[in-house]
Image: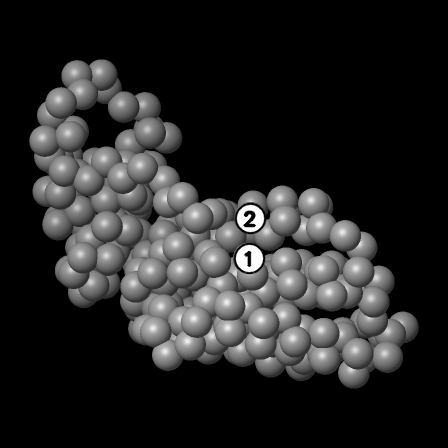
Amino acid sequence: MKNRPQVVSSRAAAAASPRRLSKEERLRQLLDVSWKLISDEGTDALTLGRLAAEAGVTKPVAYDHFGTRNGLLAALYEDYDIRQTALIDAAIAASKPSLNEKARVIASSYVNCVLTQGREIPELLAALSGSAELAAVKRQYQLAFIEKCKQILAPFAGAQGVSQTSLWAMLGAADALSQATVVGDISEQQAQDELAETIRAMVKRSK
């Protein structure tokens, strides 16, 4: 996840390619351009009209893919979540079967994902909280992440597993530590170490 997908972000780039993009390729282009817009100018600059202009397509193309601005924001969060999930799954599969190792992998993967997106993720999370519809989308993916962590940590927890309360607390810590790293208040290593210790302590309390 350290390498962000290559961004096709300008009208010139779009014009330079005579081949008509497939629907999937166009979606990837529009998402990449959206991420760049958020990174450069913030979420407020991201409208379907502006996206179409930056991507070198007509407005109907952008509306066909996302429907509304909220649909675009939801698609961006899904895009981020898919990449985050893939990174964590691969790292967990390659890790040793110990609590220390699983905690380290969850922590490092989470922080790395947020840092890879940089400014974009805090901006996107703030935008997602701006409507009930988008807050529901965010919560859906939060619940999926919590369930994934619960399953990963179950072999090291007590008979009842890690409580839902503890898992929500862990997620809050993960978001806060990642955000502090993005703005430079703490280092990436400090965030990863603290989050890993939080996870280990949470699992030990469940026994």
The residue carrying pointer 1 sits among few (fewer than 14), some (14 to 19) or many (20 or more) residues within 10 Å by Cα, namely many
Q: Residue at x 67, y 80 (%)?
A: 166
Residue 128 appears in the rendering: no
Residue 79 appears in the rendering: yes
**Toward the viewer: 180 or 60?**
180
> Which quadrant of the figure contains the C terminus?
bottom right
On the rendered structure, is 200 left or right of 196? right
Mark 2 highlights which residue? 87
Q: How is the image coloured?
A: one colour
Compared to 18, does 142 lie above or below? below
Percent position (x, y) of residue 202?
72, 79
Percent position (x, y) of residue 106?
62, 61
Q: Residue at x 70, y 46 (%)?
A: 93
Residue 109 - label: 1
On the rendered structure, is 77 left or right of 109? left
Say what secondary structure mark 1 lies in: helix
Q: What residue type is disc 2 on? A: Leu
Q: Are marks 2 and 1 in contact (CB under 8 Å)?
A: yes
Percent position (x, y) of residue 133?
39, 66
Q: What residue type is disc 1 on? A: Ser
Residue 138 - label: none
On the rendered structure, is 53 left or right of 187? left
